[in-house]
């Protein structure tokens, strides 16, 4: 695998993961009550705990995207020149 291939793969992974995070955020904003109703059938959750779980999950996912996709992409972009 060449540096250009790896850089391209990391770029596409970053785009796809950021798209997934955006989809999750928008879905949570606009369909929060429906999601909460569906999950509260299976788990005993308060609305505050539900919000905290989603907020923490989105924060962890965003940090993971930056650590494992965006930063290596820019590192290869800088080192590849």
Image (cartoon, rainbow, N blue to C red):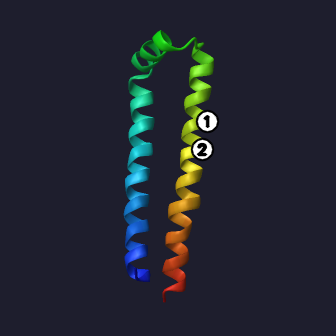
Check disc 1 and report its element: helix, strand or loop: helix
Residue at 57%, 11% in the rendered image: 44
Q: Is residue 53 left or right of residue 32?
A: right
Quarter of the figure with the N terminus: bottom left
Q: Residues within 10 Å of mark 1 (few under 14, many from 20)?
A: few
Residue at 59%, 28% in the rendered image: 53
Position in image of residue 79 (x %, y %): 54, 85
Position in image of residue 70 (x %, y %): 51, 64
Position in image of residue 41 (x %, y %): 46, 10
Residue at 53%, 14% in the rendered image: 43
Q: Residues within 10 Å of mark 2 (few under 14, many from 20)?
A: few
Tell me the CA gap for discs 1 and 2.
Answer: 6 Å
Are the residues tagged 1 and 2 within 8 Å (C-beta)? yes
Q: Residue 56, which numbered label?
A: 1
Q: Is residue 24 left or right of residue 49?
A: left
Q: Establish if 45 lies above or below 18.
A: above
The residue under label 2 is: 60
Instruction: Tell me which corner region of the image, top left, top right, bottom left or bottom right, holds residue 75.
Output: bottom right
Instruction: Tell me which corner region of the image, top left, top right, bottom left or bottom right, holds residue 24.
Output: top left
Check disc 2 and report its element: helix, strand or loop: helix
Instruction: Tell me which corner region of the image, top left, top right, bottom left or bottom right, holds residue 45.
Output: top right
Q: Establish if 42 lies above or below 4.
A: above
Residue at 59%, 42% in the rendered image: 59
């Amino acid at each position: 695998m060449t540096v250009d291939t790896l850089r391209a793969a990391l770029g596409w992974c970053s785009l796809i993961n950021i798209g997934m995070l955006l989809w999750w955020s928008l879905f949570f904003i606009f369909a929060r009550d429906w999601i909460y109703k569906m999950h509260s059938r299976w788990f005993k959750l308060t609305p505050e705990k539900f919000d905290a779980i989603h907020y923490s999950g989105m924060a962890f996912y965003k940090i993971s995207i930056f650590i494992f996709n965006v930063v290596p992409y820019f590192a290869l972009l800088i080192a590849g020149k």
